[in-house]
Image (cartoon, coloured by chain):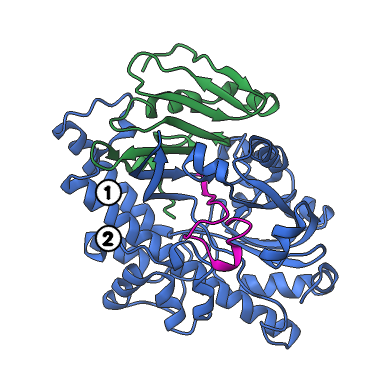
Chain colours: A blue, B green
Amino acid sequence: MLSAKDVRDRLPDIVDGLFRNIPSGLGSRRKDLKLSHGELKAVLQKGARWATAHGFGTSSDLENIENQGCLDDADPDAVSEKAYERGKDQLGTVGSGNHFVEVGYIAEVFDENAARAFGLFRDQATIMIHTGSRGLGYQVCDESIRQMLKAAEKYGITLADRQLCCAPFNSTEGRRYFSAMAAAANYAFANRQMITHWVRETFQEVYGASDVSLGLGLVYDVCHNIAKKETHRVAGKDVTLCVHRKGATRAFPPGSPLIPDRYREVGQPVLVPGDMGRASYILAGTQQAMDETFGSTCHGAGRVMSRNQAMRTSRGRSISKEMEERGVYVRAASKATLAEEMPEAYKDVSKVVRVVHRAGISKLVAKIIPMGSIKG
Amino acid sequence: MSEETIKLQKIDENRYIVKKSGLMRVDGIVYVDEELLGYLGTDESIKQVRNVATLPGIVKGSLAMPDIHWGYGFPIGGVAAFDIEEGIISPGGVGYDIN
């Protein structure tokens, strides 16, 4: 098991290694891994299961991924050629924007029982991965919006804002988007699973020890931009719903059959990344979330400055130097991304999680302080 | 919808409500406290909470988490559930960064 000190002693080696082994940045691609159409189709069908079957991580990782890393509703044929084209060499890459791989440590434990179930303890080193379906998912969304504008008109849906364009769930257009989105979600599951593998390899390189002895098990992998078909109790009746979570995280309660056995007593782990300088949190799902928010909670800090505003505010400053002064070693593919992502561009995540904890829609388990990260 | 400001009423320390009015089919519920509420002043996201509440088949409420901010159509930090028979699905409710 790695402690904060173990990581601090080798921090540049770790972060430089991650930066070398996991491509990041706008349009980042893997020169060593270009998928054929058939292979990519299998990724869209199988998600993280494709990754573990090809040697990226182990099948035991799958137990700790939302939906075991695979949405059965995916239809790879609902995804356009253009999306395939964008996706073929981006699997296993971080991308840009707010995506990252972050090394940190558990600075505080709020709930000993839940922390124990999650395998977390004070001063333990952690790695958090934040990325999604890359250009392929973007393309799926972009094309769907154009189709949904037409569909809304066709089905006579009044839109308060054109950007709300939609179709009945049970229409050809609705089902097509749902199955294309699920395919993109599977790509995202596979993407993170592969990055998990390269994170472990990087640590093995640095410490010359196995990932098991280093304690690099997966706590949880959870979505925060997704639409899911789920059953919820509304006004005393079980109903099937299409739950849209956009910048919101599933937070299922203790006893839920949809979370791993080992978390059944304490609730589903929820990962809430903050900005790169302050903190991130691990929460647990609650029954109250189930009752009030369709089993959902927050997903991060939330921006307070637009990307442009952040760029202006950071003019003449070195964000990487400022981060180093705070004890966070950052490697980024672009200076512009660092400027857009500087801590003050975000709300303080501690204030965000305080609200969901007090409201009871999830509970605080542990606080992570960052030590280093790679960014786009 | 129009330019008017939207009234958020306090339910308790951590919950505010946009009461159902006009074309809204359900209330909007925002999980936020007084301190974080201060950040929402310049943001159009509360209007988005209201707009989402007008969509067909929406169940219970148009919900938003304390990290709410403006997104494409639906706010980021938003949760909206639609009846599978009567309701809709929208790419804006998921966003560009799928999963």
Where does residue A208 sit, x and y in percent of width and height? 73, 88
Residue at the extreme front = A236
How many other residues sit within 10 Å of disc 2, few (<14), some (14-19) or many (≥20)? few
Which residue does the numbered mark 2 point to in the structure image? A82
Residue at 28% x, 30% y: name it. B56
Residue A114 forms part of the magenta stretch: no
Above-or-below relation of A49 to B72: below
Residue A143, numbered label? 1
Q: Which residues are magenta?
A: A247-268
Q: Going 31% across and 69% down the picture, which residue do you hit?
A: A45
Quadrant in which the C terminus of chain A appears: bottom right
| Residue ID at (44%, 51%) | B97
Which corner quadrant holds the N terminus of chain A? bottom right
In this view, the residue in front, A275 or A257, is: A257
- Tell me the subunit letter for badge 2: A
User: Residue A115: x percent and y percent?
Assistant: 72, 60
Residue A267 image position (x, y, % from top left): 59, 55
Q: Are marks 2 and 1 on the same chain?
A: yes
